[in-house]
Image: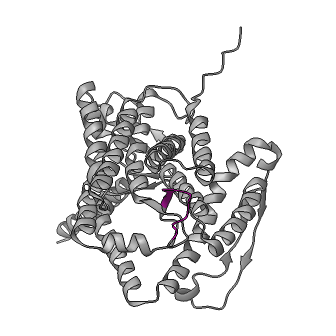
């Protein structure tokens, strides 16, 4: 019997990686209209990172049809193991926590030296950026040089005399478990972040920002469509208030010198007065937060198609409609910003675009119930707690009955 031909792979993932690299390089050499740069670069980042998130389905165990009345609902449940999944309570609290963090930064810039605040924040982002770059680069090195996939393991335990509430339990576990490619990537990333910490060049900032987007979106789950909607609606009002209601958001964005934004040069010709090139910015939150939602839609498409391959070719109606709506929303943001010459809360346009497009798609396809029932939450812990509670109640009832019989 002839062997089955290999299934076709999605070439657009490699194409979009190429677009990201080309735009990053090209923007340093030639003047690219920044509106085109924003739209194309962000679209490529979202396409790649959302498809990478399909790998999360490989960590899941979908519930099948067992003939029970709840089997239809179980078909829409994907229990992920070892994946960071947002809970409903966290989604509701996120705008409040974000507001507190944002206002805290605003106060820090207002009452403390700007250089000192940026020094502390830059050190933190350089360290975190090193990890994000390592995770982004290592797979490419492993794919190019297969022997570098070999893993190196060494147990390193360091005892310490500190109290547990200060230093944690002793000994400290500093064991190493990494491939050779990951170690090479880490060393290269550490050198890069060291140069970024010193130079603060806008192109180096963008490398870290892009890595944050790629890794964040690909490794985080909103849990359910409903939780995603709660999060986006909360952030919709959060963004409007802090941009239109106060100067807090704009002040922090302009003063914070770290890779929490992607910078786009308006022109490579320096301004004669400042001798610096003029830059426009897009906050990572305007990419990552809607990106979480788009990634959930793509995993829903993959779940419906029975695919767990990020390179697989299958129908993606929810993802494609959501991505197109996102691009239209971002283009609207840029148009309004340029026309009125004022900062705009991007989520004011992006949230209705993402939520509206996905829900309209579900209505047209007659799959509203399936979309709302789709879940990636780990319900095992809740079931265990519920079972333990029932056991305790049963024990108490049994003891009461025994006491009555004794009387």
Residue pictured at 35% horizontal, 47% vertical: 330
The residue most toward the front is 272
Q: Quadrant of the C terminus?
A: bottom left
Q: Judge by depth and name the residue closer to the eye, 125 or 25.
A: 25
Quarter where residue 186 is shown: bottom right
Q: Quadrant of the N terminus?
A: top right
Report the label total: 0
Q: Judge by depth and name the residue closer to the eye, 231 or 238.
A: 238
Residue pictured at 61% horizontal, 91% vertical: 162
Q: Judge by depth and name the residue closer to the eye, 311 or 390.
A: 311
Residue 311 magenta-highlighted:
no
Q: Position of residue 286 (x, y in %)?
A: 39, 55
Query: Is residue 353 left or right of 381 when viewed as pictured?
Result: left
Q: Position of residue 378 (x, y in %)?
A: 41, 51
Query: Is residue 182 left or right of 218 when viewed as pictured?
Result: right
Q: Main secondary structure of the magenta part?
A: loop
Residue pictured at 52% horizontal, 77% vertical: 121
The residues colored magenta run: 262-272
1 shown above or below 122: above
Q: Position of residue 305 (x, y in %)?
A: 44, 27
118 shown above or below 130: below
Q: Is residue 393 visible?
A: no
The residue most toward the right is 147
Query: Is residue 378 left or right of 208 when viewed as pictured?
Result: left
Quarter where residue 161 is shown: bottom right
Residue pictured at 38% horizontal, 51% vertical: 222
Q: Position of residue 227 (x, y in %)?
A: 30, 51
Q: Judge by depth and name the residue closer to the eye, 276 or 34.
A: 276
Q: Is residue 342 visible?
A: yes
């Amino acid at each position: 019997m002839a062997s089955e031909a290999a299934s076709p792979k999605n070439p657009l993932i490699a194409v979009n990686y190429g677009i990201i690299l080309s735009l990053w390089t090209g923007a340093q050499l030639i003047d690219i209209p920044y509106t085109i740069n924003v739209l194309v670069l962000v679209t490529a980042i979202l396409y790649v990172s959302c498809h990478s998130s399909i790998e999360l389905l490989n960590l899941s165990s979908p519930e099948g049809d067992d003939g029970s009345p709840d089997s239809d609902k179980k078909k829409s449940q994907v229990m992920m193991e070892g994946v960071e999944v947002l809970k409903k309570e966290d989604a509701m609290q996120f705008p409040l926590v974000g507001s507190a963090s944002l206002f805290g930064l605003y106060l820090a810039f207002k009452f403390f030296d700007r250089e000192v605040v940026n020094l502390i924040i830059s050190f933190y982002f350089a360290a975190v950026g090193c990890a994000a770059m390592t995770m982004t680069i290592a797979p490419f090195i492993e794919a190019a040089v297969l022997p570098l996939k070999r893993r190196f393991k060494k147990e390193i335990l360091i005892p310490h005399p500190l109290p547990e509430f200060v230093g944690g339990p002793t000994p400290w576990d500093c064991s190493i478990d990494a491939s050779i490619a990951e170690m090479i990537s880490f060393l290269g990333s550490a050198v890069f972040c060291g140069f970024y910490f010193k130079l603060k060049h806008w192109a180096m900032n963008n490398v870290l920002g892009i890595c944050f987007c790629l890794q964040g979106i690909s490794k985080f789950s909103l849990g359910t469509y409903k939780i995603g909607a709660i999060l986006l609606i909360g952030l919709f009002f959060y963004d409007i208030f802090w941009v239109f209601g106060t100067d807090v958001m704009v002040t922090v964005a302009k003063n914070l010198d770290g890779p929490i934004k992607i910078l786009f040069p308006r022109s490579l010709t320096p301004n004669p007065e400042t001798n610096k090139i003029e830059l426009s910015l897009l906050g990572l939150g305007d990419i990552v937060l809607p990106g979480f939602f788009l990634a959930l839609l793509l995993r829903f498409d993959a779940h419906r198609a029975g695919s767990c391959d990020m390179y697989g070719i299958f129908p993606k109606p929810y993802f494609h409609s959501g991505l197109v709506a996102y691009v239209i929303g971002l283009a609207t943001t840029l148009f309004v910003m340029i026309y009125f010459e004022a900062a705009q809360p991007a989520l004011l346009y992006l949230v209705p675009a993402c939520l509206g497009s996905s829900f309209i798609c579900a209505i047209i396809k007659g799959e509203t119930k399936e979309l709302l029932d789709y879940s990636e939450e780990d319900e095992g812990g809740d079931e265990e707690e519920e079972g333990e509670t029932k056991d305790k109640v049963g024990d108490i009832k049994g003891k009461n009955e025994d006491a009555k019989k004794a009387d």
